[in-house]
Amino acid sequence: MPDHPALQLHIPEPKHRPGEAADFSHIRLPKAGSVERPLITTSAYDIRELAFQLIRVLDDEGSPKGAWDPGLDAETLKRGLRAMLLTRAYDERMVRMQRQGKTSFYMKCTGEEAVAVAQAFAFERNDMFFPTYRQQGLLIARDWPILDMMCQVYSNSGDRLKGRQMPVMYSSREAGFFSISGNLGTQISQAVGWAMASAYKGDTRIASGWIGDGATAEPDFHYALTLASVYHAPVVLNVVNNQWAISCYQGIAGGDESTFASRGIGYGIPALRVDGNDFLAVFAVTRWAAERARSNLGPTLIELFTYRAAAHSTSDDPSRYRPADEYEKWPLGDPVDRLKRHLVAAGAWSNDEHQAMLAEVDAQVRDAGKQAEELGTLNHGPRPDVRTMFEDVLKEVPWNLARQRKELGL
């Protein structure tokens, strides 16, 4: 027998475990403004290197650099800052409510607010979103009432979904926000299907879908890329690489072998990798991709490189699988602080104005919270009427459900 070495199976391991010092020195960060901005007509092959780089606009002092600077005016940036602050304040309150037993479950997006808010700003109001459960900022950026969102979390008498969805699984046709699914991979293939239908009908609306780094290992992700590539679907496909899929770090899904953006290359899809904590860069890259889709140039794959600061959900304890201070060591900082620093550096914002905005969004969340609790919570107050269980599911009620309803005296 040949004298070969024994085979070994590679098991990906995160760089840090609880009790160890967090160190992100292995992450190579290019200087802000150093990555080229190609024309939207450039082929996927000619910009394949962008799938391995990291597009950044804001430098460490908060100054915009390079060709990707979208040149947004101060008022637009202030609206973006407010939407991120409101998202964060909303998250904080709802976690407290869950701890008080007023809802069963909640998921925060702390550290990822720029992903949803900046991307919402980059699309047109009637474009369609297919989000996962950490893009509540999309709704908030589109001025959807947080009272309605709270009622959905509580499944109370004001819940438009009538208690049929888990908490945080929002849905709003009016806001162009497709129902969130706990089966994460489905959203991105549905986004492609919706975009294909829009093109088939000669519509003008495009779609965008979101998926996490872990769910890229699901078949749905690859189905979506195949269909989007073959049919040139007018869609923007987003991979939110926040480093953790619950307790599985991103290497389990292949993030150590290559970037998630690079997966678009094999499908002939232009792929970009962006600093997900840089509001300006996220907006610019998303607008670039949206313009491609709207110009009948097909899909774009975007990897948003960010970090999930909070627990995966209120059912998760991240101290069991990562150092407690890991987020504090994250080299791309906090998206809210970075946008604030940019506005201050530009002379368009001050600490006093920032504190006033914080107080304003806190008051807005508090007032909405009081109204929502008057409509009921998990254990107290009114809930959707029991007869609604027979409504809004089937267009025509079949005989067996009609009989059950009659037996219940409804």
Image (tube, rainbow, N blue to C red):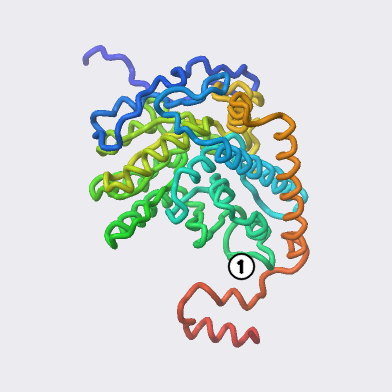
Q: Amino acid at mark 1?
A: Lys
Residue 45, by quadrant, is top left
| Residue in the picture at 29% in, 50% down | 233
Location of residue 340 in the rendering, given as x and y in whole percent from the top left corner: 62, 30
* Most distant residue in the top direction: 3
- Residue 302, horizontal then vertical, whole percent: 39, 37
The kind of secondary structure element at disc 1 is loop
Q: Residue at x 39, y 32 (%)?
A: 260
Q: Residues within 10 Å of mark 1 (few under 14, many from 20)?
A: many
Q: How many marks?
A: 1
Q: Looking at the picture, how far across and down is residue 20, in whole percent?
A: 62, 18
Q: Is residue 9 visible?
A: no
Position in image of residue 359 (x %, y %):
75, 41
- Name the residue carrying label 1: 162
In the image, taking residue 237 as reference, residue 121 lies left or right, namely: right
Q: In the rendered image, which quarter contains the C terminus?
A: bottom right
**In front of the other: 97 or 64:** 64
Please tell me whether residue 410 is drawn above or below residue 268 in the rendered image. Answer: below
250 versus 196 height, above or below: above
Q: Quadrant of the N terminus?
A: top left
The part of the image, by quadrant, that contains residue 251 is: top left
| Residue 57 is at least partly visible in this image | yes
Identify the residue shown where x is 29% and y is 28%.
Answer: 48
Lateral position of residue 87 relative to residue 126, left or right: right
Q: Give the answer, above or below, for where 272 lies relative to 223.
A: above
Q: Nearer the viewer, residue 253 or 192?
A: 192
Q: Is residue 102 positioned above or below 248 on the image?
A: below
